[in-house]
Structures are given as C-alpha cells and as structure tokens.
Image: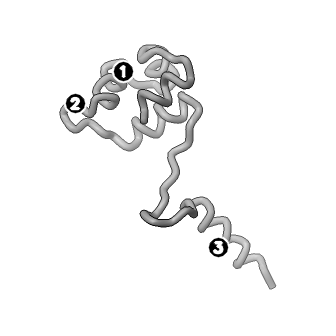
C-alpha cells in the first residue's frame, strides 16, 4: 500500500523520504517489508507525506476509530 500511495502522489522514494523526515532506505525497506521493518511512526509519516491518513478500523466494521471518538464526543455534549 505504501508503494501505491507513493506512486499515486507522484513521488520518488527519495522525495517521500525527505517529506517524511526519514531515510530513503527506510522507504525501500517498508515498501518491500525487508527485515520485517514496519515502524508505525515511520509508516504514519510516510503515508501523511504522500497525502494519506492511517485509520484504525476494527476487522469486520466500517467505522473508524475517529468515527467512534466523534460519536462519544457528541454523546458527552448531548443533554
């Protein structure tokens, strides 16, 4: 998915790495999952640099964590 996001954003590995503040080798390793390298913080920065957000969604559900938190905030405000 990271490689697809990078390509959709018309970025090279070097450009994406620079925008995300990581090394180009980190992008390459994460795109190929070399050595099991999957730092969540680096992945979030890389996806954001490519114009994407990482959303947590419970398996089998369509609501994201953001949706659930927004609903809880509305419940807290409601009289």
Q: Position of residue 40 (x, y in %)?
A: 38, 43
The label number, if any, that marks residue 14 in the structure image: none
Most extreme residue toward the bottom, as rendered? 79
Image quarter in which the N terminus is found = top left
Return the residue at label 1: 23
Query: Do residues under tags 3 and 1 come within 8 Å of each other at their CB atoms?
Result: no
Q: Secondary structure at mark 3?
A: helix
In this rendering, position of residue 58 left or right of residue 30: right
- In the image, what residue occupies the spot 28% across and 29% down? 32
Disc 1 + disc 2, Cβ < 8 Å: no
Please report the residue visible at 32 percent of the width from the left and 26 percent of the height from the top. Answer: 26
Q: Which residue is mark 2?
A: 34
Which numbered mark, 1 or 2, is in the foreground of this view?
Answer: 2
Q: Quadrant of residue 72?
A: bottom right
Front-lying residue, 10 or 43: 10
x 18%, y 33%: residue: 35
Q: Residues within 10 Å of mark 3 (few under 14, many from 20)?
A: few
- The C terminus: image quadrant: bottom right
Give the SS element for disc 1.
loop
| Structural crowding at the residue carrying mark 2, measured as other residues with C-alpha within 10 Å and reported as few (<14), some (14–19) or many (≥20) | few
Q: CA distance from mark 1 to mark 2?
A: 15 Å
Q: Position of residue 44 (x, y in %)?
A: 46, 40
* In the depicted structure, whether residue 39 falls above or below residue 76: above
Mark 3 to mark 1 CA distance (whole Å): 38 Å
Q: Which mark is residue 72?
A: 3
C-alpha separation, residue under disc 3 versus residue under disc 2: 39 Å
Residue reaching furthest to the left: 35
């Amino acid at each position: 998915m990271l490689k697809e996001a990078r390509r959709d954003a018309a970025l090279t590995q070097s450009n994406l790495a620079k925008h995300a503040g990581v090394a180009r080798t980190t992008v390459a390793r994460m795109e190929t999952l070399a050595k099991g390298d999957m730092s969540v913080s680096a992945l979030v920065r890389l996806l954001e640099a490519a114009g994407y957000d990482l959303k947590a969604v419970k398996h089998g559900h369509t609501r994201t964590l953001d949706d659930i938190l927004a609903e809880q905030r509305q419940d807290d405000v409601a009289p």
